[in-house]
Image (cartoon, rainbow, N blue to C red):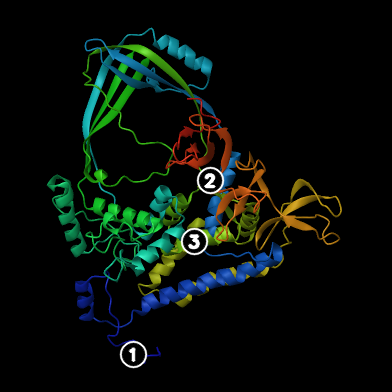
Amino acid sequence: MNSILGIDENDDCRIEFNEITKQAVVDSLGHARPIDMGRVNAQQARRILDRLVGYKISPILWKKVRTGLSAGRVQSVAVRLICDRDREIEAFKPEEYWSIDAKFTEKNTNQQFGARLERIKGKKIELGSEADTKAVAQDALTKSYTITKVKKGKRNRKAPAPFTTSTLQQEAARKLNSSPANTMRVAQQLYEGIDVGEGVVGLITYMRTDSMRIANEAVGEARVYITDKYGKDYLPEKPNVYKNRRSAQDAHEAIRPTSVMRTPKSLEGVLDRYQMRLYELIFNRFIASQMAPEVSDTISADIEGGDYLFRASGSIVRFPGYRAVYIEGRDDDEEEKDKRLPELIEGCVCAISDLDPQQHFTQPPPRFTDATLVKTLEEKGIGRPSTYATIISTIIDREYVEREGRTLKATDIGFVVTDLMKNNFEDIVDEEFTADMETKLDAIEEGGNWKKTLADFYAPFKLTLDDAEKIERVKLPVVETDIPCEKCGAMMVIKSGRFGKFLACPNYPECKNTKPLVEEVGVPCPKCGAKVIKRKSKKGKVFFGCEKYPDCDYVSWNQPVEEKCSECGGDMVLKFGKNKAPYHECTNEACKHREFVKSKQDNG
């Protein structure tokens, strides 16, 4: 291989270090090696394959659907995942079911505890109507109950691993409501360095990594910090070591602060709000990863009477361990709770003091969020974690997907393109095919034939491309509005262009009238009473403002609501909690009162 520097690839011209520490760099200088052509070929094959897919299919989408669209080896699979999930949600039919919670009183001690009905005549309960539930509840009240089984145990919850690129993006989305692209942008700033008063200093290690390995020097620093700040009880006997995924390249260590001596508190006033929040997340996760596990006492008790078996379960945290520093975010809406139970003894007699039948409905699978999409792509072996931020940004920019609160929702154009891809390029949007191709690309590093891998892909791909020329042009769905065209009177339709959606006359080209699409939120402006409309900033972020701007300067990042604050009468806005639960919050800084928003099916 000829190069600008004139270096022979067979000479010992390459040094390799997996962590940015002095010792690692010094050691690598003493162990130079020739260029690994397996890695070069793997990277080259991946680039060629991505360009084959993108450069060959994208022009077909321009001809058959609309200009400005694109396809990609990984992005098209990501869009299909979202489309398939949305269709599953749309087709879902909720089913009613009921549960029965009871409050028991232990007769000897008079202590009360809660339990839930689990079985009737030895079978798992299936209550599908209010009438059946009431009949069961009335009969259950007539029975005498005894604690027939008590099971006690201990639970050790191990500390989470330090961040990789993927887990950082997921956790930042859950805890900071930060998109993968924004997370990586801020992480890049922390990595490149901030002037902390002693010159520009890199605050975190390299943020594009799939490894959970930590440098020995950093582990030692963390153990000293934990001992000094939290005490020896919080320090495990041996350092915690985390096993990498089988597909991990392990080129860099996990994401961590470059020095635990630079605590988040010491950087107050130096970092901006976004930098501080992300640095604090990385710092706390790293410290937690080297701490002792949480220890809890668990208890489960069966209470039986007649045909009915109720079960009470709970746990008590005896030692917080790493959770004194860090608690992982969750993708589901359920809050984690520790239910305390009194000392329960087998053979003791109990009586029901209260029954609480509750109606529920089965729920469809949740829409993807940034966090769950990244997690799914990684679990399925699709793409590389370092590319996920770009992929999500691309599918939003192409209008295949749009944000709805914290979720990702497929658009009409997303469905159209996905269907076209499924019908004509099935392999490209097939999860298993894409994951298998990643495996083949990885195998090239171990000496696989990169040219044969590409040839095996291209031969059938070329035939598919030739057939795709016969595809009829796809008509995009037209959404008609009740807004008349000022020039010809026809009802205008919503169309999409380079700068987003707009209103256009359906009689084009005879009538070329267009106008901006204004999306009203149905709430009067708190300042002047005019309509509040949804707008987008130059960076594409949604905000809400008065239609009479600039005469009225009302603006809000959160959607205003009609309800007024029950505490002070102030204006309220819609927000979402850590578990994606909606709530209304008062905009009065002196009040900030919050009210939970019940869902349509929340009858609890």
- Per the image, label 3 sits on a secondary structure element best described as helix
Query: What number is the disc on residue 93?
Result: none
**Residue type indicated by callout 1:** Asp
Residue linked to disc 2: 558
- Which residue does the image show at 28% across and 52% down from the upper left? 284
CA separation in Å, label 1 and label 3: 36 Å
Displayed quadrant of residue 55: bottom right
Residue 481, image x, y percentages: 75, 46
Residue linked to disc 1: 8
Displayed quadrant of residue 321: top left
| Front residue of 490 and 307 | 490
Work out whether 121 lies above or below 328.
above
Residue 120, image x, y percentages: 40, 18
- State which mark lies toward you, 1 or 2: 2
Residue 344, image x, y percentages: 23, 20
> Upstream in the sequence, badge 1 or badge 3?
1
Within 10 Å of disc 1 (Cα), the crowding (few <14, some 14-19, many 20+) is few
| Front residue of 518 and 359 | 518
- Which residue does the image show at 27% across and 70% down from the upper left? 18
- Which residue does the image show at 29% across and 52% down from the upper left? 285
- Per the image, label 2 sits on a secondary structure element best described as loop
Displayed quadrant of residue 374: bottom left
- State which mark lies toward you, 1 or 3: 1
- Which residue does the image show at 74% across and 61% down from the upper left? 472
Is residue 291 shown left or right of residue 2? left
> Upstream in the sequence, badge 1 or badge 2?
1
Residue linked to disc 3: 434
**Residue type indicated by callout 3:** Thr
Is residue 518 shown left or right of residue 427? right
- Per the image, label 1 sits on a secondary structure element best described as loop
Work out whether 29 lies above or below 396.
below
Is residue 474 shown left or right of residue 176? right
